Image (spheres, rainbow, N blue to C red):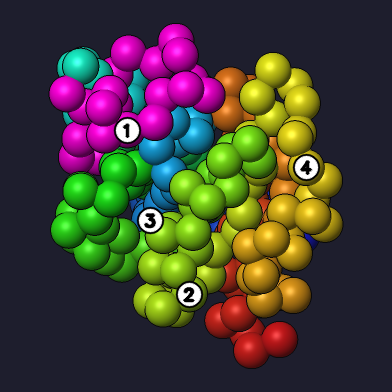
């Protein structure tokens, strides 16, 4: 929260200063990515936190797709993202997040470069019941060098594995944040995105 708190503290001063020069400045736009495997809660998370009606590119899961995508752990899932999701969130008067969600299936991986280009950081959503599904996203951001945090989605309010166990299984660097969150809760998603912001700021400062 330190990053957002410092931004908030600076916000009134910036607003006062800009008032002497006319209209207040618009908030700084920041691109963020929500990524992860199939059916982990990316679209739900963006929809929960977005202050606008989120843009989604979902298609019905057909019998053919069901044979490719494992829906055994998400039997109520009837649609899937085939391009990207988009939403936005104003954190305070000085900072606005533009949130892009990647498709989860490997066959749509060719789109990731375009969706993630220019992002300050990424939130990799993980279903602790299916850790293998998040490895492509973790590998992608490790190779790309984009700061990221792991958000373990508590399906039905339960984590199948502890956060230390998830960290160990994913073998991510010690500085990568690993948090639990509820993709249905706007507050929970917001706090997880703030974790990514703080991590990205720390990386930028070289700490």
Mark 2 or 4, which is nearer the eye?
4
Evaluate if marks 2 and 3 touch, with contact meaning CB atoms under 8 Å apart: no
Residue at 69% from the left image edge and 17% from the top image edge? 156
Circle nearer the N terminus (2, 4): 2
Along the viewing direction, whichever of 85 and 163 lies nearer the viewer: 163
Examine the rendered structure and indicate whether residue 7 appears above or below residue 183.
below
Q: Depth-wise, is mark 1 or mark 3 nearer the camera?
A: 1
Q: Is residue 8 magenta?
A: no
**SS under mark 2:** helix
Label 1 and label 3: CA atoms lie apart by 29 Å
Q: Position of residue 142 (x, y in %)?
A: 48, 74
Residue 142 circle label: 2
**For mark 1, what is the residue?**
69
Front of the two marks 4 and 3: 4
- Residue 161 - label: 4
Looking at the rendering, which quadrant does residue 184 occupy? Answer: top right
Q: Secondary structure at mark 1?
A: loop
Instruction: Say if residue 51 shows up in the picture.
Output: no
Q: Mark 1 touching mark 3, by CB under 8 A?
A: no
For residue 31, the mark is 3
Identify which residue is drawn at 21% across, 27% down. Answer: 65
Q: Earlier in the sequence, mark 4 or mark 1?
A: 1
> Which stretch did the figure color magenta?
64-84
Looking at the image, do the residues carrying marks 2 and 1 touch, with CB atoms under 8 Å apart? no
Mark sitting earlier along the chain (4/3): 3
């Amino acid at each position: 929260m330190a990053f957002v708190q410092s931004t908030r503290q600076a916000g009134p001063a910036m607003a006062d200063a800009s008032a002497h020069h006319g209209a207040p400045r618009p908030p700084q736009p920041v691109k963020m990515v929500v990524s992860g495997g199939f059916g982990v809660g990316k679209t739900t998370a963006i929809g929960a936190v977005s202050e606008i009606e989120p843009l989604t590119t979902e298609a019905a899961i057909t019998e053919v797709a069901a044979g490719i995508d494992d829906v055994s752990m998400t039997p109520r899932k009837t649609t899937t993202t085939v391009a990207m999701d988009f939403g936005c969130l104003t954190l305070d008067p000085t900072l606005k997040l533009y949130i892009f969600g990647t498709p989860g299936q490997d066959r749509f991986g060719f789109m990731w470069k375009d969706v993630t280009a220019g992002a300050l950081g990424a939130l990799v959503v993980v279903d602790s019941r299916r850790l293998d599904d998040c490895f492509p996203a973790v590998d992608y951001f490790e190779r790309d060098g984009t700061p990221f945090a792991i958000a373990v989605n508590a399906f039905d309010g339960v984590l199948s594995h502890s956060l230390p166990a998830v960290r160990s299984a994913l073998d991510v660097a010690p500085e990568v944040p690993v948090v639990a969150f509820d993709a249905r809760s706007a507050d929970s998603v917001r706090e997880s995105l703030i974790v990514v912001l703080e991590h990205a700021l720390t990386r930028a400062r070289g700490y």
